[in-house]
Each structure stands twice: as C-alpha cells, then as structure tokens.
Amino acid sequence: MEEEVLGKAYDRRLMSRLLVYLRPYRRTVAVSLVLLLGDSVLQICGPLLTRLAIDKYLAPAGTGSWLDAYLSPNAVTGLAQISLLYVLVLSGTLVFDFGQTYLMQLTGQRAMFDLRRDLMAKLQQLDIGYFDQHPVGRLVTRVTTDVDVLNDLFTSGLVTIIGDLLMLSFVVAAMLRLSVGLTLILLAVLPFVVMITIHFRRSVQQSYRRIRVAIAKINSYLQEHINGMAVLQLFNREERSRVEFSRINAEHMDAYKDSIFAYAWFYPVIEFCGMLAIAGILAYGGFRVAGGALTVGVLAAFFQYALRFFRPIQDLSEKYNILQSAMAAGERVFKLMDTPVEIASSPAAVPFPEGPLAIEFDHVWFAYKGEDWILRDVSFCIAPGEVIAVVGHTGAGKTTLTSLLLRFYDVQRGSIKLGGVDIRQLDLRELRRHFSIVLQDPYLFTGTIASNIRLGTSSITESQMREATRRVNLLGYVESLPEKFDRHVRERGAGFSTGQKQLISFARALAHNPQVLILDEATSSVDTETELRVRDALNSLVEGRTSIIIAHRLSTIQRADRIFVMHKGELRESGSHQDLLALRGIYYRLYRLQYREAS
C-alpha cells in the first residue's frame, strides 16, 4: 500500500528534511546555481546576436544597438565579429552546462551515499520484531529504488526546475522587449499547452504508481524465491514460479508501456503547438515586416526564442512528476527513518556487573502479539559456569528464552537479571558483547573464513583464531585448503557443507571468548559423524563459562548440570538427566520416545 501513495507534489516538511542532505555540499550547490544562471543568460544572447547580424549587415535597418560602437562598419568584418561572439556564447553555454550538470550529479551521488548510509544504520538499530513484520524485499526497495528516485530529484529536479523557470522568465522578458504583439501570439497557445500537460501528468502519475508497486513486488518475489531456491527445485515448482514471476513482470511491463505511450504523444503534441505558434509568428511577423513596423532580425530572433520557450515547458511537466515521485519516496524513506527503536540502551545505563554472572528469570511473561502468551510466569536461576539444557516440544518457548536474554525482544511482565541487574538497565552493546550464539542454521557472510570467525572483532589475533578452530576440530580442514583462512566464502556459505559451516560458527563463538554461550539446536542439522565432532567441540566450548543448550536430541545434553523442560510456555520440570528420568514426567516421555525411535 505504501508504494501506491503519490502524495503532494511539494511538501515543505519533506523538502526541508531532504535538503539537510545537501547542506554539507552547499558550496557546490551554490556554484552550480551560479553556473545555471550564467547558462540561462547566455541562452538569451544567441537570438539577439542573430537579430543584430541580420538587421545591421544582412538586411540593414539601423538598429542602434549598444554593440554598434564596437562593431566594424564593414559587413564582412562585422559578421566575423558577431560570429566570434556567437562561438564564445556557445562555448560558455557548453562550459556552464557541463559544470552545472557535473556538480549536481556529483552532489546528488554524495547526498544519496549519506542517505543510504543512514538508512543502513537505522535498519541495524531496529529490533528483530520489526523485521518479523516487514518483508525484506520492501526494505531493499527503500534503500535502492526509493533512494534512486530522490537522486533524480537532486540531479534532475530541483536545480533544473530553477533553470527552466529562469529560462522561461528571461525568454519572455526578451520577447516582450522585442515585440509585444509577437509575444502575445506565442503565449496564445499556452492554455492548450497547460491542458495537455495536466492530462499528460495524470497519465504518467498512474503509470509511475503502478511501476513502483510492480518493482516492490519484483524485489520481494526475487528475495523470497532466490533464498528458497533449493525448496523450489526440490518440489518441482520452477514452472509455477516462472508463471507467477511472469505475471508480476508483466504488470511492470504494462505500467511502463502506459508511460511510454504518454511520452510518445506528449512531446509531439507540444511540438505541434509550438509549430502552430511559430506559424502564427511567421504570418503576423511577415505582415509587420512588409509594413516596415518590424525588422527581419527581430522576426528571426523570435523564431529562436519560440524554440527555447517550449523546451522548458516540456521539461517542467516531466520535472513535476519527478518532484511528486520524490515526495512519495521521501515519505516512505523518512517513515522508515522515523520508526521508533523499541529495543535500545537505557539513557541512564548502569555499569556492566563485574565478575561471574548469574542469570535470573523472575516471573517472566512474554507474547509476540497481544496476550497470546509464549512464556507464562517463567522463573529460574542459572549459576555462573553452569551448563543448562532446555528441551521441549516445538513451540514450547525454548528459543524465546534466549531471544529475551539477548534483548531481541522485551518482556511484558517480570524481569530478566544478569549479575543481579535488570538487562533493560544495561547498555545493549555491552550486554550482547558477553554472549555468543550458535544457531541451528549457521549463517556465513561473504568474505573469508577468517573474516567470518572474527566478524569484525579486530582484537582476535591469528593465534587465537587458530586455537579456536583447533579446539572445535576444524583446523585440519582449514589447513588442507590452499588459501587456508583466506579461503573465499560466498553468500550464505555456498560451497561449504552444513557441518563445515556449523564448525566455523563454533570457532566464531569460541574465538570471541564469551562469558555466556548459547547453542540453539546447533547439532540438529548435521550428520552423525559431524555431530560426534561437534560433541567434542562442545566440551571445549562450554568449559569455564555459563552455557545454555537448546536441543531436541537428548543425547547431546545428558551431561548438562541441569535440564529445563519447557511445555506450552511454562517451565514444568528441572533437574539432572537422572533426576528427570526418575520423575517419570514430560522429560521421561520425551526420552522414551526418542529411545524408541532410535531403536
């Protein structure tokens, strides 16, 4: 729905916010405006020189121009002087036009660089809940397509609109000075031009709206289906996907067809109106010249001014659409920028507690939406250095516990304390710095093995990285590679097996030496041999630190100090493996079920 909103053609509030991004480059913009003014003035000089050449030398009429004192009375010499002036005017126009265009294009790119940087920074500040509700494709559209529309405003909109208005003002002033009658004939077609332009603008507005909607759909569709390509191919949905994408792509093409058709008729119709005006100037001006009331030079100058008069009108109609599209894009971009950050560090953050950290959940209630409670009155305490396992059926709230502990979400009731301090009172970066997490689906970034282990933490030395990979049984594999730690990693770790990616994730967690380690189904997607290697790595990972292990495979957590059994959002059982078996409750049934499946 956001893509369909056109909004105002000009919104002062939005424009003032957009101009903030031009403020660092105001000197460049000022130089560009000076060049634009010079270009507009020089555009007026050409027809005046034409008039002077005709009236003084080709069809003398005694014009009495201020240039007469400087021009030779000899026709050949005088025409040569005027030609030289014309060349200088054209050269100046070329230089001014190039300088203005180059400076504004450069400024636009710099401003858009700043805006994209701020958008990316904002996206990184937003809490995980925001991304649960907003498709990635739409967010990509904000940072790409919408910013490109704003770039068009800076490079082809604001300054060129000023240039077109200056040109129109100078042209009309020059024409009125030469002949009021001929000027009125030219202006007589203006109402028709305005009506045609309004109709064109409405047609293009609708097509632009449809284009934006189609682009947003294409981005969302591509992001979803490229990420899910393996599933798509597994279930033989290639043909169905092609048909669906063809439908979305056809919407985009049809919208562009309407835009192409609008531009195809608009420019010829404006040109036709211009030619009608020129025909009227020729007829009226011819009679005036024949009657001696007008010179041939003035008539020739009017022909040139008429061509210059309609060109800015054509440009202004297009710039209006750019302006309106930019206002709509700016509305969407700044709506994202103004999204409140729900999870943020407290302004009065307390110092992070020193020494061993105890973790306490105190009557915690949590729901992702409304009062559809995922956790219900959960309370427990984890001592420093204790290894805790969390088990339970799917949807019991296991992963939610760790998400709350890392403050990806905030609890609705109760509190979570770390070292006796409510985590909402701690600096968010400082809180997360003491944790490492290994997920069920290991995520690797484009780069190298080394960059994926360090993950931007420059303090991790080469020896620490090697030691971490050795302890998780990965060093032998890395040493066997020609590039070793500099082995290139493609997007999402393509080219590495799931087990290799998981071991890299373990090495990453260990290299950062966290106080608290979280393993969320870290062994559920690997083969048996890799799982045995991972189990050995687990012993290194949990040694000397508080660890929370979420697992479905009960064989991986039997050595845990305590096991928490979650059921329908409640902590139903707690104890060691043997204690829970003796209790013959939920854990006992889970264990018997898995034992029977294994048998």
Image: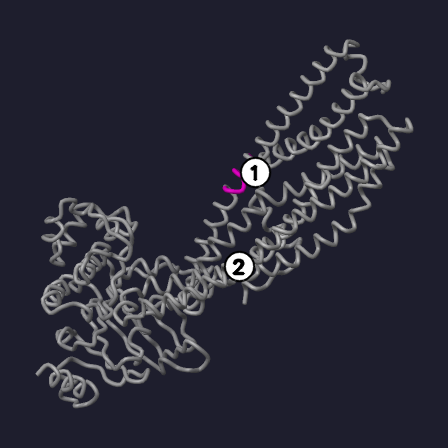
Q: Secondary structure at mark 2?
A: helix
Residue 345 in sight: no
**On the image, numbered disc 2 is attached to which residue?**
211
In this orientation, which residue lies closer to the viewer: 571 or 450?
450
Would residue 105 be counted in the magenta stretch? yes
- Magenta stretch: give its range: 103-109
Q: Quadrant of residue 592?
A: bottom left
Type of the residue with mark 2: Ile
Residue in view at x 57 percent, y 31 percent: 98
For label 1, the residue is 104
The residue closer to the viewer here, 341 or 94, is 94
Q: Residues within 10 Å of mark 1 (few under 14, many from 20)?
A: many
Q: Tell me which label, 1 or 2, sits earlier in the chain.
A: 1
Looking at the rendered structure, the kind of residue marked 1 is Met
**Residue 538 left/right relative to 335:** left
Residue 383: x and y in percent read 23, 71
Per the image, label 1 sits on a secondary structure element best described as helix
